[in-house]
Amino acid sequence: MESRRNCPECHLTFEAEMPETGILVCPLCNSAFTALPADVPPSMAAPPPCDSGRQMWRGVLAVGALFFLVGGAGYAYHLLNDIDHKAAVRTPAAHAPSEPPSPPPAEYVAVIPIEPMPQATIQPQPRPPKLQPHAAVEKTQRPLTLPERVNAAIERGLAHLLKNHNKHLQYCNYLGLLGLTLLECGVATDDPSVRQIATWIRSQDRQITQTYELTLAILFLDRLGDPRDRVLIGSFGQRLIRGQFSCGAWTYSCLVNDRQRMLGYYRHRSVPSQRIVYRGDNSNTQFAILGLWVAQRHGVPASSALLAAEQYFRSTQKADGSWAYHSNASNWRDSMTCAGLMSLAMRYGLYAGQGRDIRPNRPIAVHDAAVQRGLRYLSQALDKINVAGGRIIGVEARDPLYFLWSLERMAVIYDLKKIGEREWYPWAAQMLVETQRPDGRWAGMSDPVGTCFALLILKRSNFAKDLQLAVQEQPAPPMPHIAGPTILQGPDVFLRQNDKPKQPASLPSITVRPGPPAPLGPSISQTPSNK
């Protein structure tokens, strides 16, 4: 029997019989539904079958949304747990660890349980080892060697002299020493400071009569090397010869053999015009000997004067091997002993044909008891000298710098590396670098004399390169007769009797040591800065 049916999808009312299955198909939308009477409301109708396409897609989307929400919650949980673990590693143990984040909502866990992911254990990174200082840093922090300290001291001292070289009126008597020091320290001969000093000395030809000034002028002009100064050097050398006493010594002035000029010289200085005692002193004599040795290179006949000075020193040596400032005094023996030893060296150079700028191929072996006694005295004197309070103490001399300069002159001529058991150059250089002032000068003697002496010592300046001896510790043979001026005659008598000085006879005690000489002490050219 047909009855009226209502389609739940398109709400079409149509007549159809009830099939045995109880499911009708709408003729309009082809939707299958359970047959209900027409008067039954649509809300009471059975739900659509599960194979409907639209309902299926809705279910798929709902399940996908659920999985997306659960997966996002799990990932957020894992991320928060990882961040808290890293913070716990970096935080000191004294601080309490942070609480873990709240678990996800219960409804999500109940629907899809999530297993916690295994947590990786994070080990703390070890601290990197401390970096060792670089080699360049160690180089700046290491102590300087003695040659490096000597070079630095020379640079500071030279800078001080160049800064004050134009103050000529303050030390005009020592301009020869100043110019000589500048040249020995490497200042060029055409440097303005050197040219000014040379001009002043040349202009004072007739006014320079002091023994110190004459010798320093000779040494400076010889070191300058200008051929035009040969005549001037000869004039200064002849003036030194005329200033020698008949005993063989010198004093401050070289006017002693001209009585009227000498008396006028002393009256100018308010000294009573009384009988003058010409006794001389060993300090001026040391300078005069060195000046005459150099003046020989320029044609000055100085052999007789040098021999007279050598006899003077032999006759005035004391029992302990020392010399004093005067022949009858006992002061300043350390420096004056160096002066006496240097004077004895000139004798050997004259007899062996050295001098006059003839460079020796080999040092001359010296067997001399007087030289041995003087060196023994010096070896004992060096033991008393040291540095205290920035000053050199224990020196029996007018000034420690003057003594060290005299010691250096003598040791270089005799080719000595040691005096006694002490290496003299490192010992002297160490004291000089320790006593240099921050401004580059050395205190003690009037500036720039002390600074010049110190720089000449550090540079080991050799003004008598044409004289080189070698001391031999053997008994001295008997001294032969010297054909020349005696102590009582003096060089002036000898020169009046002979226009040309006689050539002295050779000494049988002189022998030549084979082999070239060894280098003298630490050399400035051996330092790293000059390699």
Image: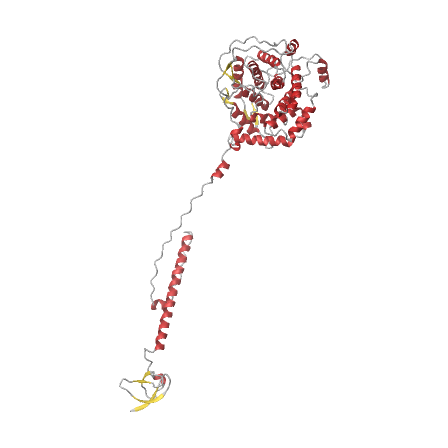
Which residue is outermost to the front? 227
State the colouring used for the structure image: secondary structure
427 versus 20 height, above or below: above
443 versus 35 height, above or below: above
Residue 182 lies in quadrant:
top right
Closer to the camera in the image, 114 or 465: 465
From the top left corner, tell me how far across and down residue 98 is, in percent. 41, 57
From the top left corner, tell me how far across and down residue 441 is, in percent. 60, 30
- Residue at the (41%, 55%) spot, across then down: 86
Closer to the camera in the image, 519 or 149: 519
Classify residue 259 as left or right of residue 414: right
Residue 36 lies in quadrant:
bottom left
Classify residue 206 as left or right of residue 131: right
- Residue at the (35%, 60%) spot, across then down: 117
From the top left corner, tell me how far across and down residue 398 is, in percent. 61, 21
Which residue is outermost to the left? 20
Q: Which quadrant holds the N terminus?
A: bottom left
From the top left corner, tell me how far across and down residue 353 is, in percent. 56, 15
Which residue is outermost to the bottom? 1
**Number of disc labels:** 0
Is residue 96 visible to the viewer in this orientation of the structure?
no
Is residue 502 visible to the viewer in this orientation of the structure?
yes
